[in-house]
Image (cartoon, rainbow, N blue to C red):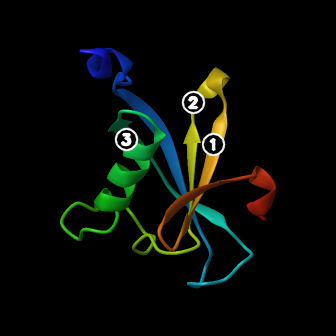
Amino acid sequence: MIKLLAKKAATNYDVTIFQTPTFRQEKGYKAVYRTTVFGQGHSHCLEETFRKFNVTDAIPGDYKGRFLSTGDIILIDQGKQGKFYYQLIPGGWKIINRINLR
């Protein structure tokens, strides 16, 4: 029962995907898509975003970016609670400073 109480409530997250024009570039990130993702915390939101944008049948029709891959950045904007940037690295997501988004 304690685990159930400790579990974060699911919420909608404002998510923006940033990619470089060419795969594996380190500069020139641009916002390529903004959406809302339902999740229970940042980890779940990142997993859902990765799944949605790496499965051909799940990708929204108006998405013009490529599949999410190493180096891509996700912004989770929680308004007054802050903005959180995550970069996809081998093995998962790493929180980064906004300064890395050049």
Are circles 3 and 1 on residues that touch, CB within 8 Å?
no
Q: From the image, which quarter does the N terminus lie in?
A: top left
Residue assigned mark 1 = 84
Decide: is 17 above or below 35.
Answer: below
**Quadrant of residue 26 in the image?**
bottom right
Residue assigned mark 2 = 78
Q: Residue furthest right?
A: 99
Q: Is residue 91 left or right of residue 6?
A: right
Three-letter amino acid code at the position of disc 2: Gln
Residue assigned mark 3 = 37
Q: Is residue 60 left or right of residue 85?
A: left
Residue at point 56%, 84% (across, down) = 23
Decide: is 75 above or below 55.
Answer: above
- In depth, the one of 10 and 29 nearer the eye is 10
Q: Judge depth for marks 3 and 1 and give the one in front.
A: 1
Q: Residues within 10 Å of mark 3 (few under 14, many from 20)?
A: some
Decide: is 95 above or below 10.
Answer: below
Q: CA distance from mark 1 to mark 2?
A: 8 Å
Give the secondary structure at mark 1: strand
Q: Residues within 10 Å of mark 2 (few under 14, many from 20)?
A: few
Give the secondary structure at mark 2: loop
Are circles 1 and 2 on residues that touch, CB within 8 Å?
yes
Image position, residue 101 (x, y; %):
73, 61
Give the secondary structure at mark 3: strand
Q: CA distance from mark 3 to mark 1?
A: 14 Å
